[in-house]
Image: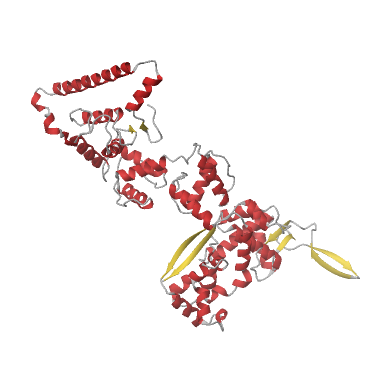
Amino acid sequence: MNNNALGEEEEETDVDYKNKASQSNYSPLSILINRSVELSKDILFKMRVFMRRSTKSNKIDNVIPIKELEDHSDTIQLQNNHDEVVKIKRKLNAIGYGGIKVNNYFGSFTQKRIREFQEDFNLPITGELNKTTSIKIDEVFLKIYHEGSNHKKILELKQKLNKLGFGELEETYLLDAQTTKRVRDFQFYYGLEATGKVDLHTIKEVNNILNSPLQRNKRNNKTLHLNKSLHTLGYDNVNFTNEFSKLTEDNLKQFQTDYNLPVSGIGDERTLKRIKEAIDTKGRASRIEYNITLDEAIKMQISSGNKMLDDIPFSKIEKLLDPVYLENDDKNKFQFLDLGRTNVTNVKELEKLLINSQLLTGKAETFKNAGTEMGINEVYLMLQILNNIQDKNNVFIELPVDCNGNITYIKNAHNNNFTKKPGYTSETDRYLYNFIPDFDTQEDAIKRGFQENWVTLDRAIYGAAKYYKDKYINTGRNTYYKMYWNPDFMERNKYADMESTKYLKQYTISIETVYNAYRKLESYILYLEIPEYK
């Protein structure tokens, strides 16, 4: 059997027979004779089945009369075209009489499947689609696909849902409550009526997605465009070919994960649409609702004595806090940059930001890996460290210490005056690096670096990544807006958090620095987390 991607066999039409006649050594008369033989075999098949049924009982009247079962008013026969055939074919495929190509043509293979169904359910074996057969098909379909049923087709359905990212389903024959929930999730996501009941529309959508040419080990001209799009969005190591390789699948799965889509690794229409939106906007915004109004938030900030707001008119204060205004400003929308989102760009793009740093040149991959492993935006991490190096406050490079973490010094004599400076001596045990300025004294910074073993640039970068993750992201200040205003605190306590801005200017890079850095990047994802006031 030559099945297509949906497991539906091509049917042979009258046109196919005519083509055979024209393309073979047989005359049209020979073809006609062959078809007559096939019809004769069909009649013999019906007779054998009828006799077999009759012999199963000692009484002939136990056989249900044909007239009681058949209604010929809406009978669809071989070689007919009818819209009802599409629905019946889908249901036959769904209940185990599969391999049928879904269209409105009633061909010989469909007739064969209907005969098999009629025989299995003790209906007159006509091979025709009559009212009684149609009702019975509906009855069997509903019996299989209702909650609590046990059937091998349910196992197939669960396997397909798992593959499409609507998973965590135990692959058994039972249609349980969890399966119903995942079916409902699938229906809602793809715009179907979200009833949780398995219907033809749901089965059709499942099969259409699984039949997508944009999946592993297939070739399609659209795959090349997909690979280029993923590269534009910052996904590395893309193959610029029309082959849908494992690398393409991995990148697509990562995209689906990053954008909270069902993770299947298949390029379905919803995923492709989301990729286009991401390229058009270079960003993704999530919304956080707060149970306070904007006016209430402003009043809390003013009444708290926030010195940032001194001598500023209320109308301007409103703009400082209004998410709608800020989101629509190219620069100020970076107040909503989610510092906890990683993989925002690729290594090649990161290298552009290090072009003027002799110390960190070649460390773009380290920043990307540190950001990913520690859970912090790699661009922000890089900019923060570059800023700290420039400020030099408690930051040190290759500081020599002994085995107890004490600085080792070398003495210099100049005009009978002795001075000392950090340097290598016989007591030097290691060199330390530190990119974090937030220490009261240099001794505290050295102690931390010694304990954490920041003995290389890479270790110091990872140490800084962990530090900023703990300081801002793990405390709920994962955006500049939250650092400035802390709406979570206001919602919870009904007054402003003055600690939010205490050290903000001293220890965080400015919005303008971040904005300018992103403007240098050609390929990136701008993850935003935007508050919504009541």
Where is residue 428? Give x, y as percent: 76, 57
Nearest the eye: 178 or 298: 298
Q: Is residue 249 above or below residue 333?
A: above
Where is residue 465? Give x, y as percent: 60, 59
Nearest the eye: 242 or 307: 242
Q: Seen in the image, is 443 located left or right of residue 504?
A: right
Residue drawn at the location 47% of the way across and 45% of the way down: 267
What quarter of the picture does the C terminus occupy? bottom left
Res. 482 visible in picture: no
Toward the bottom, the furthest residue is 311
Where is residue 422? Give x, y as percent: 78, 63
Q: Is residue 263 above or below residue 360?
A: above
Where is residue 264? Give x, y as percent: 45, 45
Q: Seen in the image, is 119 located left or right of residue 22?
A: left
Res. 2 visible in picture: yes
Q: Is residue 240 above or below residue 381?
A: above
Nearest the eye: 348 or 176: 348
Q: Seen in the image, is 217 located left or right of residue 61?
A: right
Q: Quadrant of residue 388?
A: bottom right
Q: Is residue 175 above or below residue 114?
A: below
Residue drawn at the location 26% of the way across and 17% of the way down: 37
What quarter of the picture does the N terminus occupy? top left
